[in-house]
Image (cartoon, coloured by chain):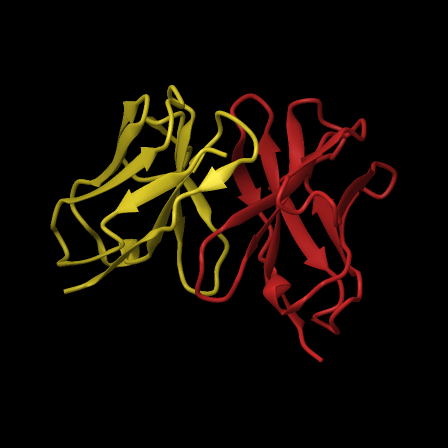
Amino acid sequence: QLQLQESGPRLMKPSETLSLTCTVSGGSVSSSTYYWGWIRQPPGKGLEWIGSIYYSGSPYYNPSLKSRVTISVDTSKNQFSLKLSSVAAADTAVYYCARQYSGSFLFDYWGQGTLVTVSS
Amino acid sequence: DIQMTQSPSSLSASVGDRVTITCRASQSISSYLNWYQQKPGKAPKLLIYAASSLQIGVPSRFSGSGSGTDFTLTISSLQPEDFATYFCQQGYGTPLTFGPGTKVDIK
């Protein structure tokens, strides 16, 4: 059974760089069938796709966040990561990692999510 | 960006009711439409993909239809475990976008 688990700091100060890692178990990030993505959800609000990456390291990002986002993959650790620079209160959200089927851009497995709060 | 809208934003229903949720895209997305269910404090769960295909393990009371710009999610007989928020998501083009959600609660 595929499992994804987010890890990283839960509390940040404005202007810092958010750094999260998603560890994949029960499957491989090196699979050619899937991308690996990040989605966030501010408290009580809807879902926003942040970006996704293929095992070969070809990321693509939401243009609304592109200037601040870096997504990378580490096949040796079976992990992929998110960095979001210059965070502000508006970046407070639950951050999810998910497996994305490359054929139709659906997200079929999700991590449990981690709440990241940005506060001074 | 492709904008996704949903209606209603919330609804109250009883166990056994037939429930229909509508999702509309700002441009044609063919059948690249997925539906998710989210319960409080939990990650979204994929229910329907490609507008009408049932994800493995999802009960058959869930069904999806539509193509182009207009789509529906139907729950044929609402069960207690179905009270949740439902989101649509387009997979036609990037950025991938989600609808604002429809909350289904108990009447």
| Residue A70 position in % (x across, y down) | 78, 45
Left or right, A7 with reference to B78? right
* Image point (74%, 50%), residue name: A68
* Image point (56%, 31%), residue name: B94
* Image point (80%, 61%), residue name: A17
Q: Colour of chain A?
A: red
Quadrant position of the N terminus of chain A in the picture: top right
Q: Nearer the viewer, residue A53 or B54?
A: A53
Left or right, A64 with reference to B99? right
| Residue B7 position in % (x across, y down) | 24, 46
Residue A77 found in image quarter: top right
Q: Residue furthest bottom?
A: A120
Residue B104 found in image quarter: bottom left
| Residue B79 position in % (x across, y down) | 22, 53
Relative to A57, residue B6 above or below: below
Task: Mark yes or no: residue B23 visible.
Answer: yes
* Image point (75%, 68%), residue name: A9
Quadrant position of the C terminus of chain A in the picture: bottom right
Q: Nearer the viewer, residue A26 or A113?
A: A113
| Residue B36 position in % (x across, y down) | 40, 44
Relative to B58, residue B29 above or below: above
Left or right, A80 with reference to A49? right
Chain seen in yellow: B
Left or right, A103 with reference to A81? left
